[in-house]
Image (cartoon, helix red, strand yellow):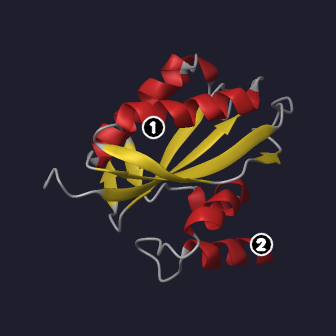
Amino acid sequence: MDHGKLNRACIAIGSNIEPRAEHLHAGIESLRVKLAPRGSVVAVSTFLETRAVVLPGQAPGSPYLNGACVIETSCSPQELLALCLEIERSRGRDRHAEGRWGARTLDLDLLLFDARVIHEPGLEIPHPRMLQRLFVLEPLAEIAGDWMVPGTDKDVRQHLDTLRAT
């Protein structure tokens, strides 16, 4: 990879453990600090409150604050994922202990990385469930609505419109 070339990536950000907004702001600031000098945060959406997704039989969770950001970086997708997981851990997240769709202090999901499609253990880009989630597409459309979703013939805004119509 040409380390001088900056790639664009989209990251979803969420929290449903108070102080939710503080966790989101700290996650974005950590991205800013840890990406330098290999990149920067170039856009951040507004935060939206949404209901928690729960499994059948699971108690309703606390509402989430969700958002998205666009970054430019010379990091590889794998390096960026590792950075996101490190930032989550620094905010107290333990992915192994929380269970699927459990409460979390900070969730950073790598959604898109340029026009790349990646299927590796632990890393799928585009994020495999992003097109079924309003809480991902709504903030993402605000800052990257015209981004074509790799493997599809639609941009983020068109996917959002399709999901809203269902």
The answer to whether 123 is drawn above or below residue 127 in the figure is above
Looking at the image, residue 111 sits to the left or right of residue 107; the answer is left
Residue 15, by quadrant, is top right
The answer to whether 111 is drawn above or below residue 21 in the figure is below
Q: Pick whichever, 34 or 104, lies toward us.
A: 34
Looking at the image, residue 93 sits to the left or right of residue 125; the answer is right
The N terminus: image quadrant: bottom left
Q: Which residue is mark 2?
A: 164
Q: Which residue is mark 1?
A: 32
Residue 143, by quadrant, is bottom right
Q: Pick whichever, 154 or 41, lies toward us.
A: 41
- What residue is drawn where x is 48% and y is 30%? 30
Q: Residue furthest bottom?
A: 153
Label at residue 150: none
- What residue is drawn where x is 57% and y is 21%? 93
The C terminus: image quadrant: bottom right
Q: Residues within 10 Å of mark 1 (few under 14, many from 20)?
A: some
